[in-house]
Amino acid sequence: MAEKEPLLQVQHLSVDFRMDRRTMLHAVRNVSFNVYPGETLGILGESGCGKSVTCMSVLRLLSARTTRYPQGKILFHGEDLLSLPDKRMREIRGDRISMIFQEPMTSLNPLFTIGDQMLEALAVHDSHMEKADALRSCREALERVNIPNAERILHSYPFTLSGGMLQRVMIAIAILNRPELLIADEPTTALDVTIQAQVLDLMNELKREYQTSIIFVTHDLGVIGEMADRVMVMYGGRKCEEGPANEVFAHPVHPYTIGLISAYPDPETIRGRLPVIPGSVPALKDIPEGCPFQNRCGIARDGCRSLFPAEEEAGPDHVVCCHKWKEEAANG
């Protein structure tokens, strides 16, 4: 991807949450990555690793009252989204950058029909569109995501539709304005396997048809393997590893990435009990100094406990943040 200009550049992003006058929680620390035109970046990690906070920061959806950005920039076509006036940010949000959330039922208003909510999404960015044209655009978006009888769905309320149908509606709303970047935050977690596969196929089709870039957030390695061109692994609000998806899965070098991949069940190779990563992700108030993975890492040493490792090249377009990764790689 080096020959292309990035569509989105996240540079040294840090995100803090103010709990009270004396308590500041560090949710994301010094995270950098790029998203290129027409590619899917998968962000992988357990719950509580900072994936959603990072993505919601791109659209500035976190509460301005409690959220602080002590450092970093989020550049979209060269504009720093963190410093834009609210009016300019509203022009970008939902038009040039859209987001699909994990739970569609909590994102849709139960008191209004699907059609009313889709029309509102269009009107925010084009208030002069004739209603007939807007309704036609809504029907076309629903048909594009393979929803049968789009006219009936336009007049339906969210609570009358299944989870899979609601997620398709959310995707239809997200693509109404043909965004350049689509952020999908765990969009298939609440769906059964069959519907999940259909939604993933649909998103890949839309990516090919519209050349939309996608940030796909998940903790599911199988989904990342199917969707992503590149992968960024996060833990404790930090980036651990990033590179082409096939390279990271075939040759992981960070102990956390290795642990995640080892714990993923493969019916063809599984023998006996699956290995697990001991312990759990620390709460924000308990993240240690140095490498946040140190308390669960089998190769952590004293240096890991005092200093977060610098980013190092582990291969072409493949980077890792670990003091001991070379020793581990040498040991096989």
Image: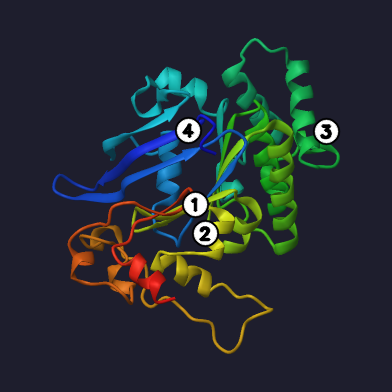
- Residue that label 1 marks: 243
Precedes in sequence: disc 4 or disc 2? 4
Instruction: Check whether the beta carbons of the residues at disc 1 and disc 2 lie within 8 A of each other.
Output: yes
Q: Which SS class for mark 2?
A: helix
Nearer-the-camera pick, 66 or 9:
9
Q: Are marks 3 and 1 in contact (CB under 8 Å)?
A: no
Q: For mark 1, does the 10 Å Cα neighbourhood hold few (<14), some (14 to 19), or many (20 or more) residues?
A: many
Q: Residue at x 75, y 39 (%)?
A: 156
The relative height of residue 219 versus residue 276 in the rendered view (above or below) is: above
In three-dimensional space, the C-alpha distance between marks 4 and 1, rounded to whole angstroms, equals: 16 Å
4 or 1: tag closer to the N-terminus: 4
Q: Which mark is residue 151?
A: 3
Query: Residue placed at 41% from the left, 44% from the top?
Result: 54
Circle nearer the viewer, 4 or 2: 2
User: Farthest residue in the right direction?
Assistant: 149
Indicate the amino acid at tag 2. Val
Label whose residue precedes the other's in the sequence (1 or 2): 1
Please identify the residue farthest to the top as the structure is shown: 128
Q: Is residue 271 above or below residue 17?
A: below
Q: Which residue is denoted by mark 4 in the rendering?
A: 8
Q: Amino acid at mark 4?
A: Leu
Q: Which residue is mark 2?
A: 248
Pointer 3: residues within 10 angstroms few (<14), some, or many (20+)? some
- Tell me if I can see residue 162 in this picture: no
Please identify the quadrant where the N terminus is shown. Answer: top right
User: Where is residue 67, by image quadrant?
Assistant: top left
In which quadrant will I find the C terminus?
bottom left
